[in-house]
Image (spheres, rainbow, N blue to C red):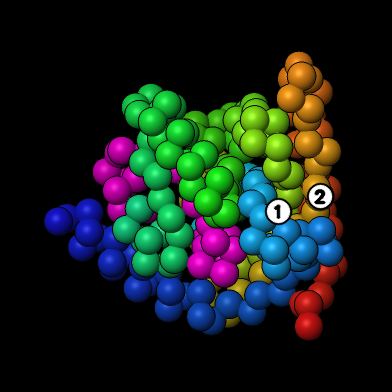
Amino acid sequence: MRAWTLGILVFIIYKTLSLTWRVKIHRPDALKNYMAEKSPVLLAHWHGDELALIQLARSYRIVTLSSHSKDGSIMTVVLNLLGAEVVRGSSSRGAVSGYLGLVRKIKKGFNSSFAVDGPRGPIYKAKMGVVETSKNLQIPIFFAGVSCDRAWVFKKSWNQTYLPKPFAKLRIVWTGPLAIPQKSQELDHTWLEKVEFELRAARQQAPSFIAES
């Protein structure tokens, strides 16, 4: 009950704030086509960008993992109210069942978001999960770059999470897709370097993009 109450409160604050944001988004044609056809994709981003991105949960048909912790319970309520599908699980508890639940949702046509340097960092160092999922399900990865002109930064958090302030200007650019690994292909650290490169490039491009019509 406490998690539900706090979740509703956080949702109200977040939703009120997000309605003031001036958001401009760029999507490549490939992502537009996948979404129009409701073909699933993987959406990779840095963990610290998540509060700027979860506003897209409903329109992007997002499914994501949330931990069994107290904070995870609150975030689950918020994400559900924002229109996301949430599967509970984490690297320390319910990892296998959580991942299998995520895969089932993706196969039904949901797009999965991956905070690639989560859940505990180090910051801006990608983990293999998003690439392994791309290989196993044979679906592409797109990458988010976010620019925000004013925000509260949680400097004590390992991921430097930020919350855009009222009337902030947000620029979100999606790039990709990354080539899908072949089923028979061995995955090595070069794939992580590709993911990190794409995310850095997307972030560098974000300030310059204008809104789509």
| Residue 66 occupies quadrant | top left
In x, y percent, where is residue 101?
43, 39
Residue 144 badge: 1
| Among the two numbered marks 1 and 2 on one chain, the one whose residue lies closer to the N terminus | 1
Q: Which residue is mark 2?
A: 176
* Residue at 55%, 46% in the rendered image: 107
Looking at the rendering, the stretch of residues picked out in magenta corresponds to 52-75
Q: Which residue sits at x=61%, y=74%?
A: 168
User: Amino acid under label 1?
Assistant: Ala
Q: Is label 2 in a helix, a strand or a loop?
A: strand
In space, the residues marked 1 and 2 are separated at their CA atoms by 9 Å
Mark 1: few/some/many CA within 10 Å (<14, 14-19, 20+): many
Residue 116 screen position, x and y as percent? 61, 38
Magenta residue check for 117: no
Residue 164 visible in this rendered orientation of the protein: no
Q: Residue at x 38, y 31 (%)?
A: 97
- Image position, residue 112 (x, y; %): 57, 48
Q: Along the horizontal axis of the image, is 193 left or right of 39?
A: right
The three-letter code of the residue at mark 2 reads Gly
On residue 117, which mark appears? none
Q: Position of residue 26 (x, y in %)?
A: 77, 67
Q: Is residue 102 above or below residue 24?
A: above
Quadrant into which the N terminus falls: bottom left
